[in-house]
Image (spheres, rainbow, N blue to C red):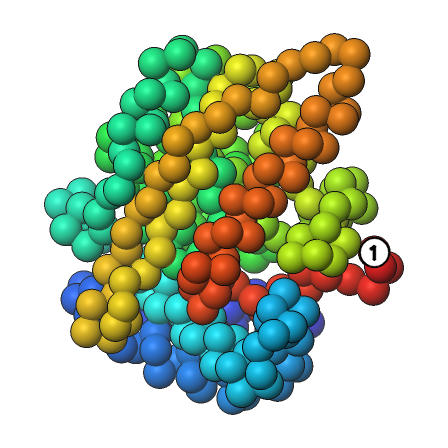
Amino acid sequence: MNLDRNFWEMRAVTLVGGAMQNASWATCRRAGWWMGLLLFQVLKKRRQLAIENVRLAFPEQSEAAARQIARRSVQNATMTLFEFVRMATATPQEISDYASWEGMEHFSDALEKGHGALMMTAHLGNWEMMAALVAQSFPLDVVARPTSNQGIQEQILRVRGHNGLKVISKHNGGRASLDALKKNHVLGIVPDQYAGPDGMLLPFFGHPTRMVSSVARFSMMSGAPIVPTFGTRRRPWISDGRIVTRVSPGYVIENDRQRREEIVREGTLRTIDDLENIIRRYPDNWLWLHRRWRSEDF
C-alpha cells in the first residue's frame, strides 16, 4: 500500500515538475489557485478540519468567513507547492525579483554578536521562497522533518540545495543545529506544527497544544538572537502574489542555570506570541490543514 502511495506521489510530483519548472511565476500562481480550489472541494475531511481549526483560533468568525480563510489557505499552499517546483530551475535573480525584503538589517545586527541567528518562521505565505531569499545574503541551515517518501525527499533536498540551503534533519538536529550557530550561520526553525508528546504543553490561540521549545532552548544555550521572519503573499494573489519577507528585531533568551526550564517556557511563550500575531494579520496565508489541536491535550 505504501509502495503504491509512494509511486503515485512521485508520479504527481514528476508531472507537476514537468509542467512548472520553466513556467512563469504567474502561471504557477494560477495553476496553484485552481488546484487548491479543487482540493478544497475534494478533500472533505481535511476541509472540515481546516474550518474547525480556524473557528477554534478565531471564534468570532462566522462559518462562512472561516470557510473562506480555510479555502484560501489551501490555495496558498498549492500556489507555494507549484512555486517550489519552479524554484528547482530558478536563478538567484529570478528569486530576488519575485521576493522582497523588509528589515534585512535585523539579521546583520544579530550576526554581529558572533553567536549565529535563529530564524523563527512558520508555514505561512511561501516559507520556501522566503528561505531562498535569506540564503542569498546569509549562510542558512534549516531544520526540517524528512518526508516518508524517499523519492520526494530527494527532490526537496535538490531544490533547497539549488537555492543555497543546507538541511538538518529534525530527527538528529540538536548537535548539528548548535554547530551551525557556532559557525555564525542563520538557523531556520519552523515551530508552528504539532510537536508531539515531547512538546511543551502551552496555549496557542488560547487552547492547549504541544509546542516546539527548541527555538528558545537553542537561544538560551548559544546566545543566538531569535529573529522572527515570515514570507507573506502580497494581494491580490493572482495578479501580484509576490512574497514579502518581513524580518523583526532579534531577542535573546538569557541563560540562568537555576531556572532553565522556566526560562525556556517563558521564551517559548514569546515565540508563540510572534506566531499568533503574524497569523492574525495574515490568516489565509497560514496552513490550517494539520491537526494543530488534539483532544488528548485538552
Q: Position of residue 40 (x, y in %)?
A: 51, 83
Q: Quadrant of the C terminus?
A: bottom right
Q: Position of residue 126 (x, y in %)?
A: 37, 56
Q: Is residue 60 above or below residue 110?
A: below
Instruction: Name the foreground residue: 56 vs 10.
Output: 56
Q: Quadrant of the N terminus?
A: bottom right
Instruction: Name the foreground residue: 228 vs 99.
Output: 228
Q: Which residue is mark 1?
A: 297
Q: Position of residue 188 (x, y in %)?
A: 46, 36
Report the number of discs.
1
How would you rate the neighbour count of disc 1 (Cα within 10 Å): few for under 14, some for 14-19, many for 20 or more?
few
Left-right relation of 174 to 246: right
For mark 1, give the secondary structure: helix
Q: Which quarter of the picture shows residue 55?
A: bottom right
Task: Identify the residue at horizontal 57%, vertical 39% (top origin).
Answer: 271
Q: Which quarter of the picture shows residue 285?
A: bottom left
Task: Identify the residue at horizontal 44%, vertical 59% (top origin).
Answer: 281
Left-right relation of 214 to 88: right
Q: Position of residue 131 (x, y in %)?
A: 36, 43
Task: Identify the residue at horizontal 40%, vertical 41% (top origin).
Answer: 229
Q: Is residue 79 visible?
A: yes
Q: Is residue 124 above or below residue 43?
A: above
Q: Is residue 256 above or below residue 293?
A: above
Task: Identify the residue at horizontal 65%, vertical 72% (top origin).
Answer: 59
Q: Is residue 81 visible?
A: no
Instruction: Name the foreground residue: 2 vs 54.
Output: 54
Q: Is residue 182 above or below residue 57?
A: above
Q: Amino acid at mark 1?
A: Asp
